[in-house]
Amino acid sequence: MKKVLAIIILVITLLFAIWYATVYFASYSEGVRSGELIKFSNKGVVFKTWEGEISQGISGAQIFSFSVEDKNKEVIKKLEEFQGRYVKLKYKERFAAISWLGDTKYFVIDVEKEESPHFRK
């Protein structure tokens, strides 16, 4: 009986490890989005995560929500600095959201300040 229970626990642990490795290391897609950075905050009760939003339209009708991993200190610093400005985000989309890393499947890996197309000279 103990041997069967140990095998079941081992199989469940192995399946979880395979699922986690696939979701964390394999990217579903990568891309770039631009918009006005309207929100960036560190939130959560048990797991503190960095979450943000950019507005991709004039009226703010299209919102892109994203997360940033804690290890990306430079990206976090830039996003705090660029609050309220037009930015270009390079992101990686994962297969699923992992609650202790972020609320979304979209993880920003780089950010650049960009000129707004609405206020060009």
Image (cartoon, grey):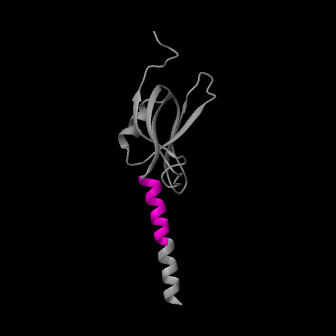
Q: Residue furthest bottom?
A: 1
What span is in magenta?
Answer: 13-25
Image position, residue 31 (x, y; %): 45, 36
Front one among 23 and 101:
23
Q: Residue at x 43, y 47 (%)?
A: 69
Q: Residue at x 52, y 84 (%)?
A: 5
Q: Does residue 32 appear left or right of residue 58 in this picture?
A: left
Q: Quadrant of the N terminus?
A: bottom right
Q: Residue at x 49, y 87 (%)?
A: 3
Q: Quadrant of the C terminus?
A: top left
Q: Residue at x 47, y 76 (%)?
A: 10
Q: Does residue 74 appear left or right of residue 87 in this picture?
A: left
> Which picture quadrant has residue 21?
bottom left
Front one among 98 and 46:
98
Image position, residue 46 (x, y; %): 53, 57
In the image, residue 30 sits, relative to residue 119, either above or below, namely below
Front one among 76 and 118:
118
Q: What secondary structure do most residues of the magenta stretch adopt? A: helix
Image position, residue 89 (x, y; %): 44, 33
Front one among 78 and 56:
56
Image position, residue 91 (x, y; %): 45, 39
